[in-house]
Image (cartoon, rainbow, N blue to C red):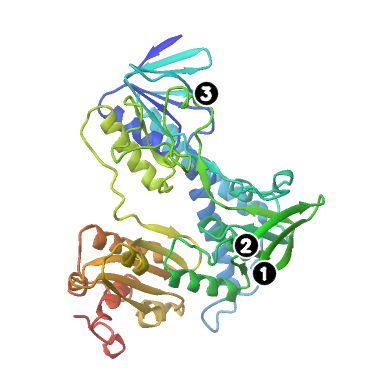
Amino acid sequence: MEHTVDLIVLGGGSAAFAAAIKAAEAGRRVALIEEGTIGGTCVNVGCVPSKTLIAAANLRYRALHPAFAGLGLGDAGLDWASIFAQKQALVDELREAKYVRVLEAYPTISWVRGRGYLDQAEPVVRVRVGEAVWEAPRGVVATGARPWIPPISGLGATPYWTSTEALAATHRPERLLVIGGSAVGLELGQLYHRLGTAVTIVEAVDRILPQEDAEVSQALSYYLGEEGIAVQSAVQLEAVDYDGSRFWVRGRQGGKTFEWTGDHVLVATGRRPHVEGFGLERVGVKLTSRGGIAVNDHLETSVPTLYAAGDVTGEAQFVYVAAEAGAVAATNALGLGERRLDLSALPRVTFTDPQVASVGYTDEAAEAAGIPCTCSTLPLEYVPRALANRDVRGFIKLVVEQETERVLGMHVVAPEAGEVIQVGVFAVRFGMTLEDLTTTLFPYLTMVEGVKLAALTFHKDVSKLSCCAGS
């Protein structure tokens, strides 16, 4: 059977859906081809399940460690099966509401179940799905990414976990070894720790969250350690063994050999673009040195009829970037306009407790780019909301251009850092200055007020201000 549409989309996650919806809103016919579970990584095995489990773990932890004297909340029981059942119920609900029912609202989108294989890309895109053939003038590849497993001796022969298995575990391990000290490893490591598991996190480079500001990494490492999580940095892993019930992870650190043991090993060393088995090489799609599909800022690939969006490009693997990229790719592919994917003010959030959030330059990156800068760090003990919460872990750091005092970056460690960072996104994107921040009204007894206080620290001693005194 042969079918003709206006746009073929390979994939069924956020980027794919955004592309399909953009085309459908313009009255175009779309074939959305997906062989796996609809919804992609975020709703099924990523953001949604991890964040709801993190919320449960944090609630339990706070009950066991109240910040306020006199609460006496007592022991916090733990029913593992119930917690994970609630997680799965939310995943199922959001997949149905945000993906399956969304498709029902767009009759020009055909959901084609199966593996799409590119037979040709020029002069038209031709994709085979089983015995059926779909043809369109343009196509968008949005096949996502999958966990990357490092080549550590013996690891491949063990029943290691990726984030997918860790978020679907049927029991709580007594001891968990986490390989990888970036966002996923830290979030899941703390989640398991707060549900009663002894956790060791092993990172190859000299600090966790190596993509973040050095002060941020140092602070979070300290807070995790205070909580009882063992964080081991600068570890050269050599081998992993498994005897049927227990894992051994061996590596070198500081010139010495160490060995860690656990009931499970979670490999959280990042994700790599899913490019195999779709016929990309057959039609001449070029890849980057990191294995993602090479695109320009219009998201065009090396083949004029094909565009790519989301994690398959290997850059900025965040669901909100994927969704924006899908819309950009479809707009350009169908000639609906000319759009570029602008990542100049890209926020990042790591959902540990305290959270980490950042946007723009670090001071090191600004100096490397030849931009003279200055920065100031405001500890949360100067933020009234943090004092009221009896939780002053963290800080707000601003990086500004020396001459103009234009905000170049913001870096936050705080329980609500993910909510605070959007002010920094606006500041970076729209070229706001310290004066813009200090002369803007911020509501009192909010964490975001700390951004204004951080801006004031460049020229004032905030310890000498009254509660609501600002500019």
Q: How many marks?
A: 3
Give the mark toward the camera: 2 or 3: 2
- Judge left or right: residue 194 versus residue 456: right
Q: Are marks 2 and 1 in contact (CB under 8 Å)?
A: no
Relative to 252, 401 lies left or right: left
Residue 212's image quarter? bottom left
Which residue is depicted at the point 46% across and 9% down?
Answer: 1
> Which amino acid does the dot numbered 3 rest on?
Gly
Mark 2 to mark 1 CA distance (whole Å): 16 Å
Residue 197 is at least partly visible in this image: no
Outermost residue, bottom direction?
464
Mark 1: give few (<14), some (14-19) or many (20+) Cα within 10 Å.
few
Residue 356: mark in rendering: none
- x, y (%) of residue 246? 78, 55
Rendered location of residue 231, percent (x, y)? 61, 68
The residue where tag 2 is placed is 202
Q: Of helix, strand and loop, which one carries label 1? A: loop
- In which quadrant will I find the C terminus? bottom left
Gap in angstroms between the C-alphas marked 1 and 3:
50 Å
Identity of the amino acid at label 1? Gly
Residue type, numbered disc 2: Val
Q: Which residue corresponds to the image point at 34% horizontal and 33% vertical from the top-left?
A: 19
Q: Which mark is residue 255?
A: 1
Residue on which the image places disc 3: 114
